[in-house]
Image (cartoon, rainbow, N blue to C red):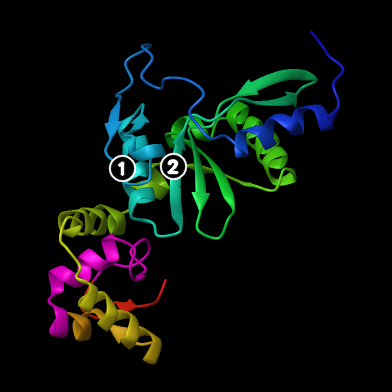
Amino acid sequence: MNILISSDQVSVSARHALESTSSSRDALHIYGRSYRGLFQSNKGLDGQSIQFESALARDALRLFELAPEVTTIISEPSVIEFILEEELRRYRPDYLLHLHDGRRALVEIKYGKEAHTPTNQARYKEVGNLVEQAGGMFAVLTEEHLRTRVLQQNIPLLERHRHLEVTRSANAWLQKNLSASSHLSLEVAANQLGRPIVLAAIAKGLVLVDFRNRLITNASILRRI
């Protein structure tokens, strides 16, 4: 049935989703055969684990956990209403990300075969426009983004070292040398602090390295946050 509703009315729901402070429902609800579980995270609200509904969503959480620009992860924020073919539709993003610079991003995790269907493409276009108008960002991540050869090697490497302690003196050395030079390599830092500690500093977000697009090697360049 066709409806009459203004763009201002539906844009309110996008703003509400971007301002969500908690999950709008329990993501562990039972349906289908999707893989689901809890991801132990330092970025969940109040130290809580973050829910995921598929193995691909868990891969996304592993990336978000290591991404220094992501400070908070909220699963399934509030519903966004949008108009498609003159009908009111409803859409619930998988995750809301609070970013270090104050921006917020709503993210859909979907296998490519589903994400690229005409129906979903039209839906994501409308939702993306509403989110952008509300001052946020919207992204659809598929296995093409989350299961690259680079990420499949770098993420486990960083996860293996994340538990190690980076002492105050080690962090101070990194920050001092990163401020003095924009070309501090992992090898130089490893010679001073040990490779495991440098990898732990990257995993904890104390220093930056391009782990999403390049394999982590001794030649990798470290940068300040």
Q: Residue furthest bottom?
A: 180
Q: Amino acid at mark 1?
A: Ser
Instruction: Judge the density around disc 1: few (<14), some (14-19), many (≥20) Cα neighbours within 10 Å.
Output: some
Q: Earlier in the sequence, mark 2 or mark 1?
A: 1
Looking at this view, is 77 or 92 the one in front?
Answer: 77
In the drawing, does residue 76 fall left or right of residue 154? right
Q: Amino acid at mark 2?
A: Ile
Mark 2–mark 1 Cα distance, whole angstroms, equals 9 Å
Percent coordinates x, y for residue 110 in the rendering: 45, 34
Do residues under tags 2 and 1 come within 8 Å of each other at their CB atoms? yes
* Residue that label 1 marks: 41
* Residue that label 2 marks: 73
Residue shown at 56% from the left, 26% from the top? 92
Residue shown at 15% from the left, 85% from the top? 192
Q: Is residue 219 above or below residue 28?
A: below
Q: Residue furthest top?
A: 1
Percent coordinates x, y for residue 140 in the rendering: 52, 41
Q: Which residues are magenta?
A: 191-216
Residue shown at 75% from the left, 44% from the top? 133
Looking at this view, is 166 or 125 the one in front?
Answer: 166
Percent coordinates x, y for residue 54 in the rendering: 34, 29
Residue 58 is at least partly visible in this image = yes
In the drawing, does residue 85 fall left or right of residue 199? right
